[in-house]
Image (tube, helix red, strand yellow):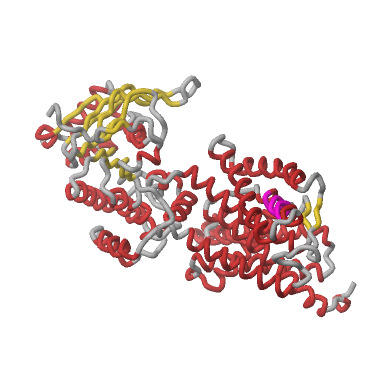
Amino acid sequence: MSLLALSPLRLFAAMPGNIAQGIIWGIMAVGVYMTFRLLNFADLTVDGSFTTGGATAVMLITGGVPAWAALLLAFLVGMVTGLATGLLHTKLGIPEILAGILTQIALYSINLRIMGGKANQVVSVDKYHLVVTMRKIPLAILSGGIICFAIICIMYWFFGTEIGSGIRATGCNPNMAKAQGINVGSMKVLTLALSNGLVALAGGLLAQYQGFADINMGRGSIVVGLAAVIIGETLGEAIFGRRLNFMGHLLFVAIGGVIYYIVIGFVLWLKMPANDLKLFTAIVVAIFLAVPYLQAKSRNSFAKAAKKGAE
Amino acid sequence: MANAPLMLELNHIRKTFNKGTINEKPALLGVTLKLNPGDFCTVIGGNGAGKSTCLNAIAGVWPVDGGSIIVDGENITGLPEYKRAEFLGRVFQDPMNGTAATMQIDENLALAARRGNRRGLGWGITKQEHEIYHEQLKTLELGLEDRMTQKVGLLSGGQRQALTLLMATLKKPKLLLLDEHTAALDPKTAEKVLHLTDEIVKRDSLTALMVTHNMRDAIRMGNRLIMMNEGRIVYEVSGEEKKHLQVSDLLEKFSDVSHGQFANDRMMLA
């Protein structure tokens, strides 16, 4: 296979679709950012709650509920999944990773039940009025972008409120938070609920965009979310450095989702087998996670100290 | 003084850690202490005497096994830590512990200003607050008033400790708990933070409990002093008598109660 066989035209033709999907994953990534960065909680519920959102939205829409209302309800159902993880962790003392995994596994069965026992359910844009669809990609980019921006604005406001500050303090230093009268447990539960609500909303959007919900649509979504968070932050900090404020962080996390999908589009265009995508994603995330650590280590290493000492 | 309202009342507080296991450790064996409003009481004792444990019992880090804790007439024995925070200002030994490093200086102060309030969807910090904090930070004389939007993680240990002290007293606490809050600082910075502590406690006529390893500090600060050993208060002194106390008196008292075992710690404490 030679590079000449690759058609740049096809790459460009695929771009708008990748951007539209990237925006939807950007919303999901903003939800992950909430727990992963602000609460300092690695929440694995999202692999399940993303599908829950998709399944809920599709079943409601095919049941006659307007698509926008179905999205809101998907958000609420997603909040319940986060609530479950939060209570497992704070009330039953189950470690955070395990609490997320338990909910995620439970959701597999629940998601199947939501979809009436089927592994996938179709929602056709010919029959229903959908918020986003891959048939009208420019419109999907526009509506997805507006929804994403609105969510980011609400989050920016929320994390500036007293409760939002309490969540940030909880994530940064729980001892300090308690000493300032913050109920650390309820802050965690609340954040997990909101985060999974957003993830489920993104799942609801993706299901509409692709025209179906699938039991496996959320598999690995935590890694995609983390990839978006890390790519976005790294890029934002490279451009703006210390001046990158909270709003900037949120915007770049969403942009990270878009970049991720552009990269995916690119490697698919390079004829990488689609089955290897998850491996590729995992490697990318591992590299991005390791870079700051290795940088700090090389600045501050024993080998370097020995060399300096010998001079 | 029989009818004078007490600010803190500890009645026979008991606590054993890891009960029923091989690591069982009796930590508090019936601690009783009464502080009047405005009392500034220093707490000394060897390692494992129960000084910090006593402060943690008051703060509600865990529930006590027995006894009652009453602050300004209110029984708080059954309240969780975050609810007790309403009454307590706390400064910890580790300067990293009292502040949120990834948040700005003004945001940390705003969190402290809301201690004991119901937190809602109002702004986490308002414009007017900003001006108040500016003035408050000036009193620390560390130049922090010009760095209010910087992250606390950029501050030195001493600066963080001074900030924590300000946060603990921003909203007047019924009781200020200082748990060896200068132990991790260099001597000069420690002196500065102690001076600041004295100033704030006097200015706001606070009731305070200060654990310290430094006997000189224990003698010159505050109006009362208690010595703890093996989970009990073994010596109490206050007023004029405390003023005339010498480090040598305390050392003698120490070796009395600990049957000489304390002599090992002598050098460190003198």
Residue at 48 percent across and 52 percent down: it is A167
Which sits in the foreground, B64 or B163?
Answer: B64
Q: Where is residue A172 in the image (x, y as percent from the top left)?
A: 47, 52
Q: Where is residue A173 in the image (x, y as percent from the top left)?
A: 45, 49
Q: Does B125 sit above or below residue B200?
A: below
Q: Is residue A247 left or right of residue A291?
A: left
Image coordinates of residue A135 in percent, x first then y, are: 78, 70
Q: Is residue B230 visible?
A: no
**Residue occupying the far front of the picture:** A64
A261, above or below B209, in the image? below
Q: Find out whether residue A55 is within the magenta segment.
A: yes
Q: In which quarter of the image is residue B237?
A: top left
Snapshot quadrant of residue A251: bottom right
- Above or below, B94 against A208 in this view is above
**Predominant SS along the magenta part:** helix
Magenta stretch containing residue A148, yes or no?
A: no
* Magenta range: A49-57
